[in-house]
Image (cartoon, helix red, strand yellow):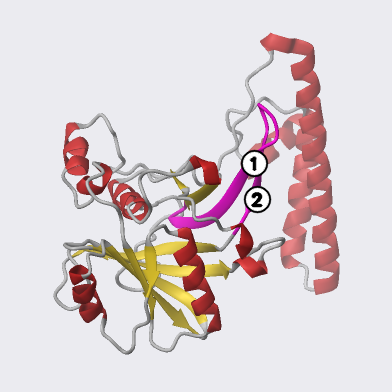
Amino acid sequence: MDVTEIIDDVEDVKPTTSKPAMSAVDRLALKKRYRAQKRLSVMKNKVMRSAQWASLKKEKRKVKKDSQKLRKKEAEELGDKAPPKQVPRTIENTREADVTTIDHDDEEVQFDITNDEYASYFSKTYEPKILITSSDNPHTKTIHFIRELTKIIPNSECRWRHRSSVKKMIASAKKRDFTDVIVVNEDRRNPDGILVTHLPDGPTAYFKVSNVKLTKDLKRGTMKEFTSHRPEVLLNNFQTRLGEAISRMLASLFHYDPQFKGRRAVTFHNQRDYIFFRHHRYEFKSDKKAALKELGPRFTLRLKWIQKGTFDTIQGEYEWIIAGKRHEMETSRRRFFL
């Protein structure tokens, strides 16, 4: 078999893309790796299969590292004439196009933003006042989680349920001039859900909570560094109309005028429809460098549903909900809703 036949065989196995042409030696090595991987799929001995697979992965890493070094060397030699850096393909930058993606220059989007339920908050006509509560008989971790939320969110109060229904609590909160209600649910002694209701006319959203780590569970975390200064709020990567609504809901929980003297920052980072919450304190080391220290807590939110108006699971009108069987709406790994 000559080199031309080997090249043809490799092209049948793995079609080439717009990458630079490979040499005959590289293609021969690629074919050998493919054959080794094919043998592993039918190998019955688990110990030998694991050892062979580890060896194959080590060889792949070595080849990848050598090619990176070669590209770096060529770029240094060519200088300004060097080819542009290759952009890795990720799920984020290859996401499916969504017709609801936000375009802030669109007149319809501007109209919806300036006339939604949070327009009065962003026009700074009132200061947020938050009621934070939990499900009945909360356990230790949930209690600590609620207390930390109370310290993070300015002008918030913690009150216990005393077996009162959510609808009664919302009616009572309206009379006491609260602007939002947060209900923390728990399962198996751990926080597992957060219900957020904007008063007086909604909307209401429910989030699944996971990966909760309290301040004491973090390395060098301490509640002593929680100051009373109002934090800055950072909202990242909310790209659709639904994502914009969720980001405005989360922003309205905090005061619109942060106190920079406290050097505290709260971040809601959306990635693949998971909203990661982080709480940091920053310190300027010099004119160009700053250091971050995580204060805690940290947790992850996943939107389950959002409805118009205040909490009403029977007659409420849902704007968006994950319905049906598990993953029924997730028709593609590259389709995201936020």
The mark found on residue 127 in the picture is: none
Residue ID at (66%, 26%): 287
Residue 176 located within the stretch drawn in magenta = no
The mark found on residue 293 in the picture is: 2
The mark found on residue 283 in the picture is: 1
Q: Residue furthest left?
A: 315
Residue 108 in the image, given as x and y percentages of width and height: 17, 37
Left-right relation of 316 to 206: left
Residue 117 visible in rendering: yes
Query: Nearest the camera: 217 or 246?
Result: 217
Residue 287 located within the stretch drawn in magenta = yes
Q: Residues within 10 Å of mark 2 (few under 14, many from 20)?
A: few
Query: Nearest the camera: 336 or 325?
Result: 336
Magenta-drawn stretch, dominant element (helix, strand or loop): strand
Left-right relation of 184 to 168: right
Label 1 element class: strand
Residue 324 in the image, given as x and y percentages of width and height: 30, 72
Residue range of the region highlighted in magenta in the rendering: 271-295
- In the displayed structure, 112 sits above or below 302; it is above
Residue ID at (14%, 75%): 315
